Amino acid sequence: MTDARWSEVDRWIAAALPHDDAALAAAREASAAAGLPAIAVSAPQGKLLHLLARAIGARRILEIGTLGGYSAIWMARALPPDGRLVTLEVDPRHAQVARANLARAGLAGVTEVRVGAALETLPRLAAEGEGPFDLAFIDADKPSNPEYFDWALRLSRPGGLIVVDNVVREGAVADPAADDPATRGVRRLFERVAAEPRVSATALQTVGTKGHDGFLVACVAGRR
């Protein structure tokens, strides 16, 4: 199969099982118009995050890497009225677009976009007593994935989920010749997760409009 067929199947799935609506489409369009990179999750991937949040009854969600807020919309829609999603974004312009997209989707009241380097913001969240979070979604710079995972675990509740995007990287993660910083970061993430007794984890390859990639999903030990 080719990349073209993967995208075709993604479009077919999105049409057969409706995913998008006006607010999500507007978020994509506003992000593109603002010149944000086209690296947000696909519609089926966004719906998967939404369903995971609903399945575990998430009331508090942490996202590391906001971009234009597309994935945040999907996850925040799974929250109860008194729920809360905190999303971290290093680029102030991206954060501005995300806030507008979240407000347009009617989610300003349950979401907060914090601006700054996540490895500086995460300690502040902990110091402020934020959390514990039921779901953490990590989709930021890949070299820092292991450190993001450590903080997500620290801020997660027993029985919570940690999801990390872009962990296959078109197969580079399994290619000994691939030695770029992002791939090294993903490999260090796998090593960290494998050595961590407080989580049970797996990873799945995906193909679609996002090419050949995948998610790592870790469940934190214990129950709420």
Image: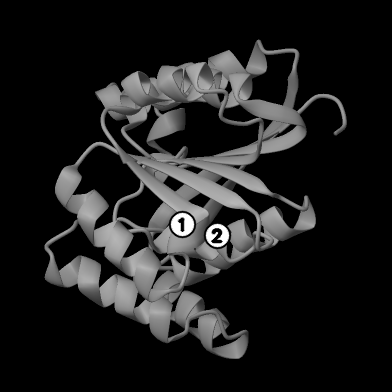
Spatial CA distance of label 2 from label 1 is 6 Å
If the image is split into quadrants, where does the C terminus sit? Answer: top right
State the residue at coordinates (52%, 20%): 126
Viewer-side residue, 173 vs 33: 33
Badge 2 density bin: few <14, some 14–19, many ≥20, Cα 10 Å: many
Tell me what residue is drawn at x 48 percent, y 70 percent: 43
- Against 139, residue 5 (above or below) is below
Residue at x-position 57% and y-position 86%: 18
**Residue 53 sits in which quadrant?**
bottom right
Label of residue 76 in the image: 2
Residue 78 spot, x, y in % from top left: 64, 63
Q: Amino acid at mark 1?
A: Ala
The image position of residue 223, as x and y in percent, is: 87, 31
Name the residue tied to disc 1: 72
**Which mark is drawn over residue 21?**
none
Q: Residue 218 or 175: which is nearer the viewer? A: 218
- Where is 191 relative to 173, above or below? above
Q: Is residue 47 left or right of residue 1?
A: right
Q: Secondary structure at mark 1?
A: helix
